[in-house]
Image (cartoon, grey):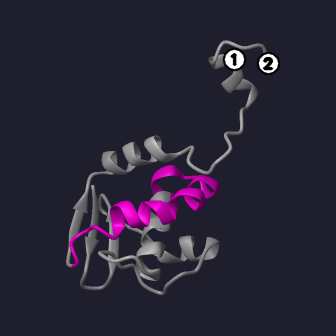
Amino acid sequence: MIKGIFDGHKILIGDKEINISKSQKIRNHSQDFSWSYGGSGPAQTALAILLEITNSELLSLSLYQNFKWEKIATLSPIDFVMPVSEVKEWVEKNRFKGVVKIMLPTDLKKEGTDG
């Protein structure tokens, strides 16, 4: 479960608090996590959540602005709870929007082509 705690601008996945600096090293929008609108704090929140869930900088960078508008901007302005499965499903649905898929030899074999 992903939890947003308004007091202290904290984001937790399970019991683990997300450290904002990991996402800031990739793209620094804000000094704090925020949500429920479409600004810089929600952009940092979206990027940080996607980095934790996907463990992919490239995928997170390609999706976080859309994720911000579709999911983060619509959250309760106080505390929120979002199932991790909801984020994973959103990523799967949107992962190829604006991204060119890089096929690895193992991917080619899975799809039944010669590699």
**Residue 64 on the magenta segment:** yes
Marks 2 and 1, the one that precedes in the sequence? 1
Which of 19/30 is in front?
30
User: Is the magenta region chiefly helix, strand or loop?
Assistant: helix
Secondary structure state at the residue bearing disc 1: helix
Give the residue at mark 1. 109
CB under 8 Å between discs 2 and 1: yes
Above or below, 102 relative to 105: below
Above or below, 110 relative to 81: above
Identify which amino acid the numbered label 1 is placed on.
Lys
Secondary structure state at the residue bearing disc 2: loop
Tell me residue 21's x, y (percent).
Answer: 54, 77
Above or below, 15 relative to 99: below
Tell me residue 97's x, y (percent).
Answer: 56, 48
Give the residue at mark 2. 115
Q: How many marks?
A: 2
Name which residue lies at 47% across and 61% down: 66
Q: Over which residues does the magenta segment extend?
A: 51-77
Q: Quadrant of residue 103 in the image?
A: top right
Tell me residue 80's x, y (percent).
Answer: 22, 68
Name which residue lies at 44% across and 42% down: 93
Quarter in which the N terminus is drawn: bottom left
Position of 16 with respect to 65 (left or right) is left
Identify which amino acid the numbered label 2 is placed on.
Gly
Name which residue lies at 62% across and 75% down: 25
Position of 80 with respect to 51 (left or right) is left
Quarter in which the C terminus is drawn: top right
Tell me residue 114's x, y (percent).
Answer: 77, 13
Above or below, 64 relative to 78: above
